[in-house]
Amino acid sequence: MTDSNALADVLAPHVTKGPVPGAVALVARGDRVEVAAVGHTDAEGTAPMARDSIFRIASITKPIVAAAVMTLVEEGELALDSPISHWLPELASPNVVREPAAPIEDVVPANRPITVEDLLTFRAGWGFSSDFSQPAVQALFPLMDPHAPQRVPEPDTWLAALARVPLLHQPGEAYLYNTCSDIQGVLIARVSGTPLPQFLAERIFEPLGMRDTGFEVPADRRDRFTSAYVPTADGGAERVDTPDGQWNSLPAFPSGAGGLASTVDDWWAFARMLLDGGGSVLSADSVRQMTTNHLTQRQREASELFTQGQGWGYGGSVDVEPRDPWQVPGRYGWVGGTGTAAHLVPSTGAVTVLMTQYAMSGPTPQQIMRDFWAYGADALK
């Protein structure tokens, strides 16, 4: 295990030239591990970035929550083909807009129940398409606030509001981004009778030693917690949260789509569990299902904006059509809108984890991510 000057050299230009305040990255394969920390935890240079710096990890929360769903499947509490309405009766009779561009009042009934697997594959019918102007997509924006989780209402209220939003497509028909992971979080709590933060702590974080991962950052760890920034119109960075801000207490709605804070080493521990066939957390069959593409070619093509033409397993993308040097068939993982990325390759045992506090401006990966992935692909040959 080494600190990597070469990896730091890849990250440093994005920090010294701006607009990224700092970054921590990890590249690993077997006993070979490289880690680099560059820049500072905030734009003011208050503290240097360190290996154990804590970040809001956004959508790389999704694979963790999908794994939690699979623990309930393994225990027989859920089945992949179970209608979710058994535990989420608010969603028992969804309507579907007559066509994607239709007003949310122009609806028809869903032609079948939504299942657990529909949620895991993002094909339930709720979520973001490539056209954010569609009325049924616009209606989802009030149900999320990725930079301010304290503003989102508690799960029962949130679910009731979602139930008033029609599906954009019939269940199973199309991949739609994000919302299904939030529904998964509510489902876990309803099925287990345990709040999502507690369930994840007991079933995933504690067994894997992910001691810095959670929906809040305790006061004694906030000296390691980074500030959060979004891009400005002139290419700069605007601070939207501080270490004593939105993550200083548990939110009413712990977002299964993007609410966790974590470190590179904690996500690496999660990746090692998957590479080990599930370890003490999951069975090898569950890991195989998570890391296998479940989308049709037509669904992949329609989701190009989000998946870059790749597939989707449970909670993360699965590479099926290598377009860039870092894409390997079966590579599993995802990116987070706060400037994070985490992937693993089951066939080689490679893991790459990048955490920054500079948010993406849209679904397209940032240049620092692409440079990091290119380095990882070359370093792990």
Image (tube, rainbow, N blue to C red):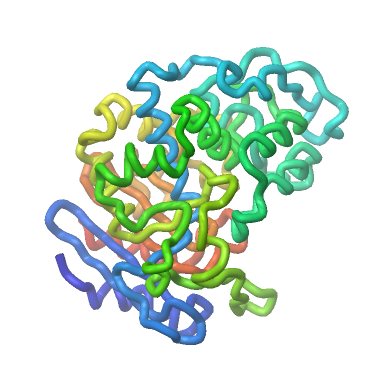
Q: Of 202 and 121, which appears nearest the observer?
A: 202
Vertical arrangement, residue 132 with respect to residue 82, above or below: below
Q: Quadrant of residue 293?
A: top left
Vertical arrangement, residue 96 with respect to residue 239, above or below: above
The residue drawn where x is 49% and y is 15% is: 81
The residue drawn where x is 41% and y is 80% is: 40
Q: Quadrant of residue 253?
A: top right
Q: Of 125 and 381, which appears nearest the observer?
A: 125
Left or right placement of residue 15 versus residue 325 in this view: right
Say if residue 302 shows up in the picture: no
The residue drawn where x is 45% and y is 33% is: 194
**Image location (x, y in percent) of residue 41:** 43, 77
Say if residue 22 shows up in the picture: yes
Judged from this view, the residue extending furthest toward the left is: 31
**Image location (x, y in percent) of residue 275:** 23, 41
Vertical arrangement, residue 160 with respect to residue 200, above or below: above
**Image location (x, y in percent) of residue 317:** 44, 41
Q: In which quarter of the image is the N terminus?
A: bottom left
**Image location (x, y in percent) of residue 188:** 48, 31
Left or right placement of residue 168 versus residue 189 in this view: right
Q: Say how many tags the image has.
A: 0
Q: Of 347 and 108, which appears nearest the observer?
A: 108
